[in-house]
Image: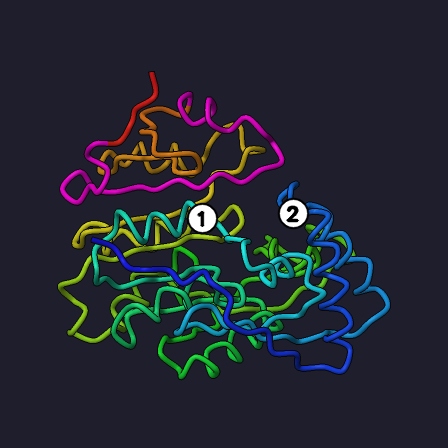
Amino acid sequence: MGIKIPTDIRRLQPRSVWARPLIMLFKFVGVITRPFSYRGVGSLSRYMAKFLPSIPIEVSLGNSARIEFNLLDYYWSRLIYPNFRYEPEIANLFEQSLPEDFLFIDCGANIGFWSIMVSGQLPDNRVVAIEAAPSTFEVLRTNFEINNRRFKIVQRAIADSSGQTVSFSTNTGHAAAHVVANESSDTAQRVVEVETVTIDDVVANEDDLSAHLPVVLKLDVEGFEIEALKGAMETISNRDVVVIYECHGADRDCLATKYLLDLGIFRIYAIDTGVSEVRTTSDALKIKTKIEKGYNFVAVKPSFDPFLHAATIS
């Protein structure tokens, strides 16, 4: 059961003359901040990014994964630390609960971390990475290339219909880039026009070799989870499906969780600290104790439930 997610750093490969002295600085700061989960490293990255250009660095994880990113990227800079595990609860899900073969649709893939990790453990072309923001997509393309093109990349915004054009804001940084209703809805922001695609259309474009496989959807679409799910109803109706999504602590209505519960075809589990079944939005609120934190949840069909012995909320 499950696939192995590589975590051990084998090599740091600087891509800039600035990289080596900065790596030494970051490692020194890491010694200080390690007991606090490296809090403060992101702030250091943000500050230095004001004065320095992008500092590309490549990290090799295990034998099968290579990922390039900007060392001054506040979101990804912690990947240089050997004992840092990004979203360990999701790694545990892949390793302990999911099958050994599946079709993985990585919606809002960012620079491709999970697409890289998962694709190295599956046959080629079992993974599709979808990212809308043009600048982030270019980094994703680089990571696609250095990982031998073993997954597919698509520059689109996930939505409830394909072929439309939406305004996409990157003003808040790539980790929180999102669709906006129109350019006037948020002033002084960087807005680009991006074509939409549905999850159903992405799945339909995959070859017949994966038609019998379960589908794992990872949604990181910054508040547009419901639209993404509406565009996945054919897949949800006809396939074994696992949905990995974030229900943010600031969302006290638990909108995505409520939508999935109301469909009446999923069991919902919180996975951040162990596995707890979520039967109501009140259960979700018990878990989401910090409004500044995003919490990872998983929705599964009862007929394809890897958490049959999961703990439940009392």
Give the residue at x 16% y 54%.
238
Q: Position of residue 240 (x, y in %)?
A: 18, 51
Q: Kindly identify which numbered label has been placed on residue 300.
A: none
102 on left or right of 278: left
- Viewer-side residue, 161 vs 76: 76
**How many discs mark residues in the rendered view?**
2
Q: Within 10 Å of the Cα at label 2, are there few (<14), some (14-19), or many (20+) other Cα atoms? A: some
For the C terminus, the quadrant is: top left
Q: Within 10 Å of the Cα at label 1, are there few (<14), some (14-19), or many (20+) other Cα atoms? A: some
Q: Position of residue 274 (x, y in %)?
A: 37, 34
Give the residue at x 47% y 68%.
61
Residue wearing tag 2: 34
| Secondary element type, mark 2 | helix
- Viewer-side residue, 142 vs 197: 142
93 on left or right of 141: left
- Viewer-side residue, 265 vs 66: 66
Q: Nearer the viewer, mark 1 or mark 2?
A: 2
- 15 over 3 or under it: above or below: below
Magenta residue span:
282-309
Figure quadrant of residue 271: top left
Q: Kindly identify which numbered label has been placed on residue 88.
A: 1
User: Mark 1 or mark 2: which comes first in sequence?
Assistant: 2
* Mark-to-mark CA distance, 1 and 2: 16 Å
Q: Residue furthest top?
A: 314
Could you tell me the amino acid type at mark 2?
Answer: Arg
